[in-house]
Amino acid sequence: MQIKYKTVTVDDVEVFYREAGPAEAPVLLLLHGFPTSSHMFRDLIPELSEHYRVIAPDLPGFGNTTAPARGEFDYTFDNLAHVIGRFTDVLALKRYALYVFDYGAPTGFRLALAHPERITAIISQNGNAYLEGLSDAWEPWQAYWRDSTPENREACRDSLSPEVIRDWQYLTGTDRTKVSPDGYTLDNAYLARPGNDEIQLDLILDYRSNVELYPAFQSYFREHQPPLLAVWGKNDPAFLPAGAEAYKRDLPQAQVHLLDTGHFALETHAHEIGMFIRGFLGEHAG
């Protein structure tokens, strides 16, 4: 299936998205994370689009989505979820499965809290909802959450550097010869746009709201029992395998697969993840 590249107006945001697959097929909504965009799904979409309508938007502050400037638009996870929720309304997506990664997890789980009846299934790829999934590497961010001083904000700026994005986010825990430079080169170009660093620092501060919502996310899992597949790069330096296994506590039927790769598991394992998803959605995406 050919991928189409589209934009749609959602209130005062121009949301860019990729779409492929039959219009009448079950919908799979792909939500990316930091610091990337829907580009991260470039190898996964062809794995799924024969049987599913696959839709992958860029979140506000990322990729090719155009949102108002900082100060005119609050860059919080509540607002990211509001925009993507309105995006699903504009596209008339009544029911859909969620693929959530990194920032896409707290964004997507907010959608599930708001409209549990719309969610047919969840695929979490290094998308965390449990405290045990957070590694010690979160300490600089957590210090900023505890005390939002200019000094603590500045200490988080290293997370935005090209070297950290390449070496820590993309290459840690994986076979570096299998990771195309296209992903981290593009992500670093997006991050280098004027003003984007401050947007990202705002989101880093607001990430504490996601951790505060973990109990609500877990309550949603227990109450609604959505079918869940966790496919996890087990060498991720940010989100530990314990975060994947923790889903079984609230969702005993959850399927968990730990892959020998890092945070951006799709860079090396798109085909394997595609096979897991096809089998899983074949049972649950109707």
Image: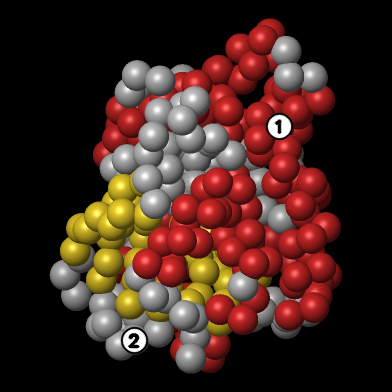
Residue at 50%, 21% (x, y): give it.
Answer: 198
Q: Is residue 173 above or below residue 278?
A: above
Seen from the viewer's position, the closer of residues 130 and 182 is: 130
Q: Is residue 190 above or below residue 91?
A: above
Give the amino acid at mark 1: Trp
Residue 3, position in %: x, y?
20, 65
Secondary element under disc 2, as helix, strand or loop, is: loop
Residue 157, position in %: x, y?
55, 17
Is 167 situated left or right of 178 in this image? right
Farthest-out residue, top = 151
Choose the circle earlier in sequence order: 1 or 2. 2
Which label belongs to residue 138?
A: 1
Residue at 52%, 69% (x, y): give it.
Answer: 98
Q: How is the image coloured?
A: secondary structure
The residue wearing badge 2 is 25
State which quadrant residue 74 falls in: top right
Which label belongs to residue 248?
A: none
Give the amino acid at mark 2: Ala
Q: Is residue 189 above or below residue 91?
A: above
Label 1, residues with CA under 10 Å away: few <14, some 14-19, many ≥20: few
Residue 185, position in %: x, y?
30, 32
Residue at 39%, 75% (x, y): give it.
Answer: 92
